[in-house]
Image (tube, coloured by chain):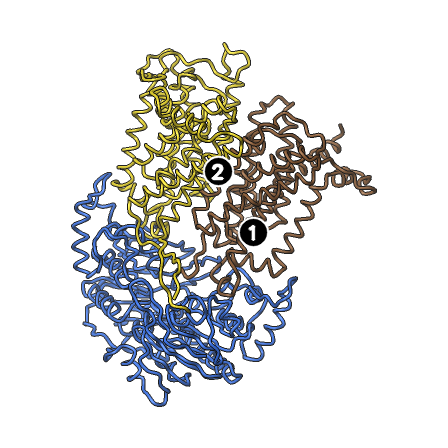
Amino acid sequence: MRMKGIVKRFPGVIANDHIDFDVKTGEIHALLGENGAGKTTLMNVLYGIYRPDEGEIYVRGKRTAIKSPKDAIELGMGMVHQHFMLVYPHTVSENIALGLSSSRFFFPVQEVEKGVAELSGKYGLKVDPKAKIWQLSVGEQQRVEIIKALYRGAQVLILDEPTSVLTPSEITDLFDVLRRIAKEGCSIVFITHKLDEVMEISDRITVLRHGKVVATVEPYKTSKRELARMMVGREVLFRLKKKPVERGEVVLEVRALHALNDRGLPAIKGVSFIASEGEILGIAGVAGNGQRELVEVITGLRKATEGSISIRGHDVTNCSPQNIIDKGVAHIPEERIRVGLVPNMSVAENLILKKYRYPPFSDKLFLKIAFIGQETEKLISEYNIITPSKENPAKLLSGGNIQRLILARELSEKPCLIVAAHPTYGLDVGATEYIRSLLLKQREMGAAILLVSEDLEEIMSLSNRIAVMFEGEIMGIVSAERAEIEEIGLMMAGAKRMTAAGEGSP
Amino acid sequence: MSLEALIVSLLYDAIRAGTPLLFGTLGEIYTERSGVLNLGVEGMMIMGAVTGFGLTLATGNVWLGILCAAIIGGLLALMHAFMSITLQANQVVSGLALTMFGLGMSGLLGKAYVGIPLPCPLRSISIPVLSTIPILGPLLFQHDQLIYLSIVLVPLLWLTLFKTRVGINIRSVGENPATADALGVNVYQVRYFCVFLGGFLAGLGGAYLSVAYRPAWTEGMTAGIGWIVIALTIFSMWSPGRALIGAYLFGGVEALQYRLQPLGISPNLLAMLPYAFAIVVLLAGTQETIRKRMGAPSALGIPYIRGEK
Amino acid sequence: MRPRLEIERRLGTSRRIMLLASILSIALALLMIALVFWGYGVDPIYAYEKIFVGSFGSIFGLSDTIAKAIPLMLCGVGLAVAFKALVWNVGAEGQLLMGAIAATGVALYVFPNSPALVVIPSMFAAGFLSGAFWGLIPSILKAKLRANEVITTLMMNYIASNLVNYLVYGPWKGLKEWGFPYTDKFPLSAWLPLLPLGTGRIHYPTLILALTLAVLTYVLVMRTKLGYEIRVMGENPDAARYAGMSYFKTAMLVMLISGGLAGLAGVGEVAGNPSHHRLRYPQGISPGYGFIAIIVAWLGRLHPLAIIPSSLLFGGLLVGGDAIQVSLDLPFAAIGIFNGVILFFVLSAELLMRYRVTFKWRREG
């Protein structure tokens, strides 16, 4: 498969700028780059989700036009997206049978089950065909996605950031599977931003930066340092400078917390910890182990079934989000646009989302438009939010600026507790550094910060203490300085648990 | 009348009264399973009623009338489909527009039919042998063909929805259209088909009212049945099997209403019963879907745009 | 290289485009309805002349149009508030009827012998509360039990309608009317004063209320805290929850306002409309104002001030409907066709507003 001169433009940005990319039979080819480099866009073009503005695609030497995913599948492409494309209430077999025009009309599910069992055994992808998707673990769901592609005879398997949702041991399993698949002659395109993996698994590496190909190299001919430089264009600082800050009083105390997830199953099973002034408590763990529910319970968006939460000594268990906001809790949400923003309203109106109730932003009935305008101007300049005007609808802002808006809103009222969920996810390096420095500054000013992130490196460089969550429990809380990555990895995989973990230790 | 005969007669009427609801609900289940909310059921049903009546009157062939009624229902549904799927308009408002249009159009077209009796309505038939069984005989085996059609449709539609390839496609389109699209399913085609089917069945239900149940034509004769269908769709948890139960339950309330009249209760108060019951049914259905965590198709009411995050 | 029609999402919508879209949609709707007329054997030009000249061409027609616009305005403004918060209140008709019932009760049974200064404000207050109450029930069901408000408000329409029937055929049946589904005529003190203009059917207290409330509602939505909450909830309910807004509180307040305004319309129809001054069977009080108000609100893009001209337009259509019913022997229900078609075209026009069609030169591939 070969892509030549692919160009794809979106309003205001060139996502793919004359990219040449090819894949040989049976090779594992990594596509490396930061968030926003254009990797996913390129693969979406290959998979027929986007049409290229310019450029050609050749499959087995023949020039083809891929107008839709259906065409792509027929040509032998299979894609496992970063956010799985699965129908959650349906069973594994139903998901695999979806859209399969070659299967039987009546009772296609039974036919599929047989094929699934075959593939399962051949490649070591264990999965129960009759299970419903929502009952499966994230790793198992990924296996379903891979089987789905293989079932349709995929000869080029594209995986978009597959390891971001796996524990270290699951990653090893996945790599074994991928090697077996490649040995059978199927090619694999492996999109990632993680240098370790790229060095371990790939036969070739293509580095993208700002939509252009920087280089295509073989792993034994390069080093991690060099790859990082190619990815970013300059020397990367792997550790931020952290000022030592005195830890103050306890701000957040969570005791024996229990809560259910959306499916009614226990998501938080007896979690306890404290967070104090001037410290960042990082919550590490693979996504889907209860972190989201934990954030929601603390911010009042989900009910706790047992246990208690208190802020500065006041019990706020199961209080309304309103109450919790009043207690000085800021929440930087995981889903910026869906939850943290009102896209059609102006920047100014978004900035008052939590403050509008209080004077001087409003009096008994009315909003004080003039004052709101002034404050907005102040915040726009203070936090460097790039927007033509404060009346512009917020949806026009870029990802980084949206996050700046949210931070401006949440941090400007000097909160005592900041709950930050994946604050730098999907942002470019500049925005990421800025946001991390803001958080550190808040910490210096005495706030307590709860940082939930999948980026282990981020957690290790920012946090004072790290709590690892696995299947709704805290496996251990360690001091960031003394933490070792293997130890944390084991806790993330549930293989290790600490007793009476470093609570209260300096 | 003996108690036994009273109950049989009540249940018999319940089945008759519930049949238009059953048709409508079966259709709306398919529509909503594919992710489209069609509130125009009332408009489609009443157009089905006037078309069925008018064509039967004109041609003397009741089945031609019924068929045309169904087709008209389907065509009207296609209008809503175009608005909701292709133009991605607000589905609630589009459905309401369809209802207004249908109610108005049927009033216009039906003006000539008011007060005219139908010389060849659909009559009940007696299935030989089976209808002589005591109790069950007169209750189940002395209905007209449309009722039998509606009953046969229940397992047929259930099978199709849950056990065939087409059914998987429909349900997936309603839950996660992006996923279905990525696997080559034509989301728009599936939705158009299901919306059309919904209208087709609603037209059948309406026709049943005017050529079999009454049979007659009066302006606005559906009296809100189309809205009750929407409530029943939720109550049936989007499954044809439960639709049957819900439809006949409602038919029972309707039948009960008439039987209570001679007791001296004001007919107007009794007329409130079906609507109040619909609210109860809605509440019960909603609670159950919450409890079982099995709600409406996740993409219901949301237009699908490829490539939009 | 070949030319291709490309459809891109528009980034923002200007007022100009919205106005253009609204006008275009009405024009197209009228065209389509002309076709319907023609198909039915009616000369469309004659029909339209009757409708528009009749409604807007003379003082008599205009006064009738304004009189019919009053309940449309009140209901429409109330619906705009509800729809802005994504609360689909389809029950304005029932809320209107409940307001009418309350006014009747006050006029005939609570204050039958009191002076106008007491009766009239009491009727309006009772009507507002009654409509508000009727709107509150579905909102509580939605907020606490997650019941779909489209169905509940609709069902409440039918219940209210049957309640009116029950009252006028039963306990409130007029002593002086034999067998007719009317109550007695209201005492004179309960008659709303009329503007001596044209046909003299404009009950101006309700008109003043309607205009004032339209302006007040605009201020409410754009400038108050509650208005801000309504708008955020309508634009992004997830963000509203995250921001600490209470869906329960906002939805309830919205339905109180919406139902109350519709209730006021009901008061006007029963106490102001000179052909009435009594409670009658439901269709005699409202020819579907609550439903037509949905279109009025939607055409006005949910903007309280735009709803004023929008309600005048539909008031004119209703007056025209009366005219063609008489002169062309068309059933009144035909107005439903108007309404449905206009709404369809208004919806289609929204698409125009959201997307921009451009010609682009594209390279092959």
Query: Is residue B10 at least partly visible in the picture?
Result: yes
Q: Quadrant of the N terminus of chain B?
A: top right
Above or below, comparing residue C234 to residue A497 in the picture: above
Q: Residue at x 51, y 65 (%)?
A: B183
Q: Identify the image quadrant of residue A498.
A: bottom left
Disc 1 sits on a residue from what chain? B
The amino acid at mark 2 is: Thr
> Can marks 1 and 2 be said to lie on one chain?
no
Q: Which mark is residue B194?
A: 1
Which residue carries the number 2 mark? Answer: C152
Is B303 positioned to the left or the right of A448 in the image?
A: right
Q: Which chain is brown?
A: B
Q: Residue at x 25, y 45 (%)?
A: A357
Q: Which chain is blue?
A: A
Disc 2 sits on a residue from what chain? C
The amino acid at mark 1 is: Cys
